[in-house]
């Protein structure tokens, strides 16, 4: 491997991916609560702010990607306690979030039809 003089390479801390996974899961939960609160007040999906809707729609795939990245990075070694908790936290957005995203997309499509 050749090294270029003047180029500094830094490896990320091993806890970056699990923390990102936990934060993404937390963002999804906050987004779901905000969507539920704004939909419950009016009963209409179109009144939900775009920020919350995007958070609910984007967090499950990002949790899945972070989870797969974490599993790939720790393939040879065992998972730490933080890794296991991060994967547990990602299960809810990936499973429930995918179902809710499909349902919300169908609802939005039916509004236009």
Image (tube, rainbow, N blue to C red):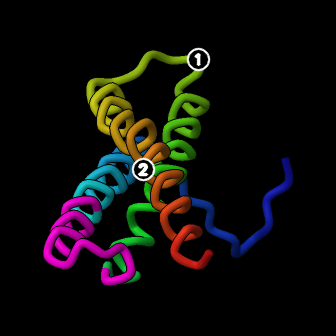
Q: Which residue is labeled 1 in the image?
A: 76
- The verdict on residue 20 being magenta is no
The structure residue drawn at horizontal position 31% and vertical position 47%, both measured from the top left corner, is: 22
User: Picture quarter containing residue 87?
Assistant: top left
Q: Nearer the viewer, residue 47 or 54?
A: 47
Residue 39, percent from left and from top = 24, 71
Tell which circle, 2 or 1, labels the residue nearer the N-terminal end.
1
Q: CA distance from mark 2 to mark 1?
A: 34 Å
Whether residue 8 is visible: yes
Q: Is the residue 77 above or below the residue 19 in the image?
A: above
**Foreground label between 2 and 1:** 2
Instruction: Give left or right: position of 24 versus 63.
Output: left
The structure residue drawn at horizontal position 33% and vertical position 38%, both measured from the top left corner, is: 92
Q: Is the residue 52 above or below the residue 14 in the image?
A: below
- The verdict on residue 35 being magenta is yes
Whether residue 12 is visible: no
User: Picture quarter containing residue 27?
Assistant: bottom left
Query: Mark 1: which secondary structure?
Result: loop
The structure residue drawn at horizontal position 27% and vertical position 25%, both measured from the top left corner, is: 81
User: Picture quarter containing residue 24?
Assistant: bottom left
Q: Nearer the viewer, residue 44 or 49?
A: 44
The structure residue drawn at horizontal position 32% and vertical position 57%, both measured from the top left corner, is: 28
- Which span is picked out in magenta? 32-47
Q: Which residue is labeled 2 in the image?
A: 100
């Amino acid at each position: 491997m050749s090294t270029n003089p003047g180029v500094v390479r830094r490896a990320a801390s091993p806890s970056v991916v699990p923390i990102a996974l936990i934060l993404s899961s937390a963002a999804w939960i906050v987004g779901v609560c905000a969507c539920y609160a704004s939909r419950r007040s009016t009963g209409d999906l179109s009144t939900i702010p775009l920020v919350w809707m995007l958070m609910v729609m984007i967090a499950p795939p990002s949790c899945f990607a972070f989870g797969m990245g974490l599993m790939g990075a720790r393939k040879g070694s065992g998972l730490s306690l933080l890794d296991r908790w991060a994967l547990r936290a990602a299960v809810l957005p990936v499973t429930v979030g995918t179902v809710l995203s499909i349902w919300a997309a169908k609802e939005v499509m039916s509004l236009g039809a």
